[in-house]
Structure formats: structure tokens, C-alpha cells
């Protein structure tokens, strides 16, 4: 038997993040073809988010997709301490998860609310805002559903009907095994941050110290980013365990099992974007 984590369709608000429902299942229909890719944080090749600004621009690296094209993309963006952008808009909506440091993202006149590692925000297309960084080192995972990712002047602002969200780490609601039905995974907790079970969605899972298990999936799209901690990773495509620190990335297509060990001194947090259920066991 294994348990399946399913994203339920519930509204996300500033005061809470909706968690995943977990239930037992004994059968899974797997996709016929499988493939995987692993990118360790130490192997990432960095460029600039805005190449025309050179070293005045935040650093950026695509983990998957291509931010310069009309396609979904997930990227890392890093900021120097004291960075603050001028007011601007984007042509597309993006999501951000803080991996390291302290970030602020809000209307140009808003007071600073510094979001620490583990915080989540969304920035609607057309919404005027500024972005600032306050940690000695600042790193985020940024995700778009379509591109290209462009920075445009505030004078071109528009209302696309979406509203921004700044969800501080301390306001995220996590459900653990004692709060979920039919779960035999002590210490594992989860939270659902966007999307719905019937479509693409995003969630985060926390794996406790000493966790030695796997995340299994048969999704046509499964993408995972290490947000906090350091894991030992292995799969049928990675015969010897490798270390994946914060900012590392794993993807798979079809029936696949990602083997994970938490040998660190704290919980591991992993963000997962997928179009199907996944199993933690």
C-alpha cells in the first residue's frame, strides 16, 4: 500500500495556505514512457535577469523552460543585499518562493514586509510594484506559466483581474500526519499553494530529519525544487547518491521514483509543480 497526496481545490488567502488531502490507494496507472533530469545547485550556470543592465541586474538561471520564449519556465534569481528595483510591471504573472535571505515585493508606496526563506508570493501581470532584498545573500525560485518574462515601465500598468499575494513563512498552514486520515508517514507535512487537483498545481512538502523514502509519480510533468535543507538523492537514472542543496532541481515524466534521504539536522522543504498526484512513502 502507498499513500497519495492529492491537491484539493480551495481558495488561498493571506492568513492561510491550503494543505493537501492524503489517502491510501493500492493501484496506480503509470505512463508508458519515463525520463528524468537532475540539476545540482553547484552545477547551475548563471546569467542576468536583465542582460542589458549587466551587474546591476539580479542574477538568473533557468532550471527548466526558457524565460525569453513563450513557454512556462522555472528559474532561480539572486539579489545582492540592499537591492531595490524601481517601480515596474511585468507582462506576465509570476510566483516566487524565497530560498535564502529576506525579500519584499509590493506596491511602490507600501512599507517593507520582509519575507524570509520559505515564504511565497504571486505578482500579477500589469500590477505596479517594487522588489527589494535585505539578506546578506538572497535567492528565490521564480515560476511563470507563459513567457517571455519582460520588465516594463509602470506607465504601461493594467489590471488583469488577478490580485497579488504575499504569504509570509509564519502564515503558511502545514498539515502533518496526525492531522490527516490514513497516513503512515510520521513527520511528513504538506501545504498546497496554487492550482487545483484537476489541473497543474503547486505544493510544498516537508520531510523530517531521518526521512529515508521516496516520492513516486506517474505525472506527465513533475518538477521539484529543493527550497530548504540538503538531501541525498538517487533514482534509476542516478545510480550513486548525490547531494542536492537548496536551489537544486529534479524533473521526471511518466512512472518514476525519486529516492530521498534527509541526513541533515533540520527539515527538508521541497516545492513540487505537477499535473497529477504523487506518493510519499
Image (cartoon, grey):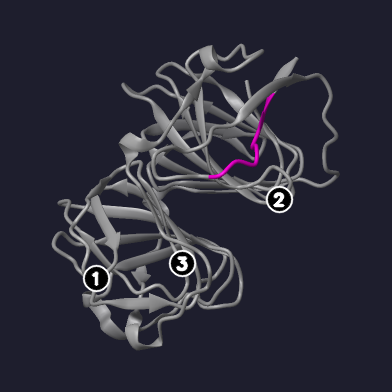
What span is in magenta?
4-11
Image height of 125 relative to 94, above or below: below
Q: Quadrant of the N terminus?
A: top right
Percent of width and height locating residue 65: 57, 65
Tell me which residue sits at (16%, 55%) in the image.
Answer: 134
- The residue to which callout 2 is attached is 199
Q: Earlier in the sequence, mark 2 or mark 3?
A: 3
Q: Earlier in the sequence, mark 2 or mark 1?
A: 1
Query: Pointers 1 and 3 in contact (CB under 8 A)?
Result: no
- The residue to which callout 3 is attached is 124
Task: Work out how far the residue at label 2 is from the one at label 1, CA to CA, in angstroms.
Answer: 34 Å
Tell me which residue sits at (54%, 32%) in the image.
Answer: 19
For mark 3, give the secondary structure: loop
Mark 2 neighbour class, 10 Å CA radius: few under 14, some 14 to 19, many 20 or more: few
Q: Is residue 114 left or right of residue 68?
A: left
- The residue to which callout 1 is attached is 108
> Magenta residues: mostly which secondary structure?
loop
Front tag of 2 and 1: 1
Count of numbered badges drawn on the protein: 3
Percent of width and height locating residue 49: 36, 73
Q: Quadrant of the C terminus?
A: top right
Image height of 54 relative to 72, above or below: below
Q: Earlier in the sequence, mark 1 or mark 3?
A: 1
Front tag of 2 and 3: 3
Amino acid at each position: 500500500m502507498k499513500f497519495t497526496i492529492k491537491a484539493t481545490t480551495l481558495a488561498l488567502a493571506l492568513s492561510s495556505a491550503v494543505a493537501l488531502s492524503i489517502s491510501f490507494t493500492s493501484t496506480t496507472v503509470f505512463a508508458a514512457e519515463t525520463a528524468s533530469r537532475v540539476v545540482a545547485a553547484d552545477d547551475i550556470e548563471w546569467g542576468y535577469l536583465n542582460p542589458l543592465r549587466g551587474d546591476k541586474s539580479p542574477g538568473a538561471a533557468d532550471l527548466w523552460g526558457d524565460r525569453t520564449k513563450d513557454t512556462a519556465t522555472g528559474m532561480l534569481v539572486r539579489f545582492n543585499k540592499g537591492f531595490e528595483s524601481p517601480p515596474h510591471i511585468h507582462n506576465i504573472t509570476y510566483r516566487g518562493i524565497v530560498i535564502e535571505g529576506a525579500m519584499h515585493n509590493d506596491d511602490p508606496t507600501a512599507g517593507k514586509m520582509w519575507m524570509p526563506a520559505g515564504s511565497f508570493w504571486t505578482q500579477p501581470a500589469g500590477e505596479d510594484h517594487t522588489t527589494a532584498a535585505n539578506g546578506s545573500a538572497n535567492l528565490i525560485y521564480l515560476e511563470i506559466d507563459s513567457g517571455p518574462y519582460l520588465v516594463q515601465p509602470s506607465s504601461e500598468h493594467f489590471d488583469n483581474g488577478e490580485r497579488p499575494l504575499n504569504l509570509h513563512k509564519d502564515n503558511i498552514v502545514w498539515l502533518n500526519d496526525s492531522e490527516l486520515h490514513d497516513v503512515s508517514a510520521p513527520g511528513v507535512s504538506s501545504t498546497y499553494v496554487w492550482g487545483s487537483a484537476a489541473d497543474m498545481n503547486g505544493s510544498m512538502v516537508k520531510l523530517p530529519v531521518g526521512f529515508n523514502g521516496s516520492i513516486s509519480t506517474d505525472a506527465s510533468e513533475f518538477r521539484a525544487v529543493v527550497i530548504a535543507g540538503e538531501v541525498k538523492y538517487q533514482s534509476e537514472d542516478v545510480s550513486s547518491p548525490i547531494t542536492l542543496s537548496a536551489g537544486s532541481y529534479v524533473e521526471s515524466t511518466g512512472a518514476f521514483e525519486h529516492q530521498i534521504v534527509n541526513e541533515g539536522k533540520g527539515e527538508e522543504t521541497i516545492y513540487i509543480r505537477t499535473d497529477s498526484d504523487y506518493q510519499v512513502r
